[in-house]
Amino acid sequence: MDVLLTETAWRRFGDGLARVAPDARPLRMLDDGSIVAGPEGVSVEWDDAAPEVVWATADLFDEGAPLRPFFGFLRRCESMSWLQSPAAGVDAPVFAEVVRRGVRLTNAHVTHIPIAEHVLRSVLAHYQQDHRWRAAQAEREWRRHDFREVHGTTWLVIGVGAIGGAVAERARAFGAQVIGVRRRPSGDEPVDEMVGPDAVTAALPRADVVVLSAPATPDTERMVDAGFLDAMKRASVLVNVGRGSLVDEEALLEALDRGVPEVAVLDVTATEPLPDDSPLWGHPSVVLTPHNAAGGTGRHARLAELFLDNLARYRDGRPLHHEVTEGDLPD
């Protein structure tokens, strides 16, 4: 069995691959898009490479990594039987392509920890106005200020999956009350109250913080529209760590100009990278990060653990963790 992975993933986790599947031959894609086989690194032409398993890892999104060659290869790879994705989202067209070709696809829920930490950090930074301390330090002045506490606030988390659940757990640890929104709740979500999507508008006036962690679907596209924004509470915070398509950005800018919400923390935008001429760049009530909330370094080891467990399951014919079916894909 041949397994395609990046050279970076091989250097980090090759020992684990050899342990779980000692007879597997690694096909390692180098940064220039070329492929070498085995630990010894024998060059293999693209047309001769026939991996049964493809392991896509988060390092593919690092600067200089072979992102385009890697996904270009798997799009034309006829030998592939199973693709392990590094991400939870399956809205990229390539995933629908491979599933409809009969390839098994598994996604990964390994970024909930850094994303939840990013959400809490962003809200705390806004509430505590930490830029004022930094400015005072730069000016060598001993200036104090009062700040808002997370304790006692109400959070509305839209999409209580792995990410939303991790956000809810951390917000509640700070003493916040959490209202969760989920289309099909399991009953064990770490929230104080659960409502359906049809009750979001009614819940918005209660929410000091609104967190978007829902996937991109036809139902969620531009869900944050003028009506949604009009219903938000004064001095509220909007945080989007889901997908940029969830927000009508023009309506958001108009709402921010009116002062509600007070600030929008956006890790995702409708177009990525954000165009140079986007008004989001310079708006004083927008905090932008470049789709980087998932960037915690622990995600690499968590993905490797998941993949290696799934690889053992794949070899034994057991069910795979987080397998995606055609019904899970967006229309």
Image (tube, grey):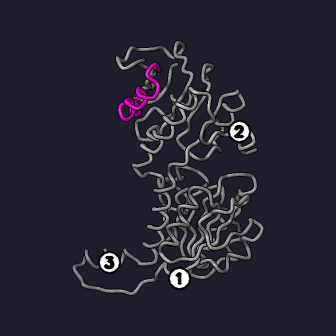
Q: Earlier in the sequence, mark 1 or mark 2?
A: 1
Q: Position of residue 46 (x, y in %)?
A: 51, 17
Query: How many residues crowd around disc 2 within 10 Å: few (fewer than 14), some, or many (20 or more)?
Result: some
Residue located 75% across and 56% down the image:
219
Judge depth for marks 2 and 3 and give the one in front: 2
Identify which amino acid the numbered label 2 is placed on.
Answer: Thr
Q: Give percent across and percent down for residue 42.
A: 38, 14
As drawn, the label of residue 152 is 1
Q: Is residue 25 above or below residue 120?
A: above
Query: How many numbered dots are placed on residues in this image?
Result: 3
| Spatial CA span between label 1 and label 2 | 41 Å
Tell me the residue that label 3 is attached to: 133
Q: Residue 125: percent from the left, percent from the top?
A: 42, 72
State yes or no: residue 8 in magenta: yes
Q: Is residue 108 left or right of residue 331?
A: left
Residue under pointer 2? 325
| Magenta stretch bounds | 7-24
SS at badge 3: helix
Q: SS at mark 2?
A: loop
Q: Amino acid at mark 1?
A: Gly
The answer to whether 156 appears left or right of 291 in the picture is right
